[in-house]
Amino acid sequence: MTTMKAEAATVRLQLTCMQSPDTSCVQGSTIFGLQDRQQNVHSGQQNPDSSLFYDVEVPVERTQQTDTVRFRGPYVHGTPRVPFLYLSLKSLEGEQPSWIRRLKIPLPMVKWDEIDRGSRTTLFVARIAGTGSGTVPLLDGGWTRRDDQHPV
């Protein structure tokens, strides 16, 4: 019996949050950023226009049955078929910090042939408004593949 080794690569995701959630009604200290599966929140880089920029590399594997990409790694939440990122607002007050709001950002549905393998990392960029909660709409048509590797 032979086992097939999964094909793997890395993609780079750049997400811009145009506006941070309103914290005026929240008492105490908070943190807003990209949430990992250990429930840590990682702050983004603030741009001159006050938007927040997140840039992460995410391992991916080829799904043999459908020839699609399965996102993996510490920032990917959800299921293999419905992966997403969380941008989370978390209270730092009290013994147990608690979630105030989480923005669920769906990841792109990508075919394996869209992924650069070898020396280059495939780059996808997206923007969100940053308001609301739950699953948020992506701006500008959603995730876009870019050939250059410069921040947007």
Image (cartoon, grey):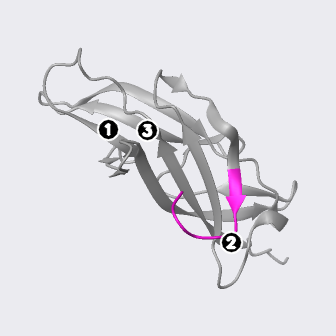
Q: Which residues are magenta?
A: 144-152
Pointer 3: what residue? Answer: 87
Q: Quadrant of residue 64?
A: bottom right
Residue in the picture at 52% in, 58% down: 73
Disc 3 to disc 2, C-alpha distance:
26 Å
Mark 3: give few (<14), some (14-19) or many (20+) Cα within 10 Å. many
Residue at numbered disc 2 = 8
Q: Residue at x 63, y 35 (%)?
A: 138
Quadrant of the drawing holding the C terminus: bottom right
* Foreground residue among 101 and 71: 101
> Is-magenta flag for residue 26?
no
Residue 32 tag number:
1
Q: Where does residue 48 sit, x and y in percent of width and height?
A: 35, 49
The x and y percentages for residue 27 are 15, 19
Asked if the residues shown at circle 3 and circle 1 are in contact, with their CB atoms under 8 angstroms apart, the answer is yes
Pointer 2 or 1: first along the chain: 2
Given the image, on which type of amino acid does mark 3 rest?
Answer: Leu
**Camera-side residue of 152 and 96:** 152
Q: Amino acid at mark 2?
A: Ala
Q: Going from the N terminus, do you reach mark 3 or mark 1 first?
A: 1
Q: Which mark is residue 114?
A: none
The quarter of the rendered structure image containing the N terminus is bottom right
Residue 56 location in percent, x, y? 48, 60
Q: CA distance from mark 3 to mark 1?
A: 7 Å
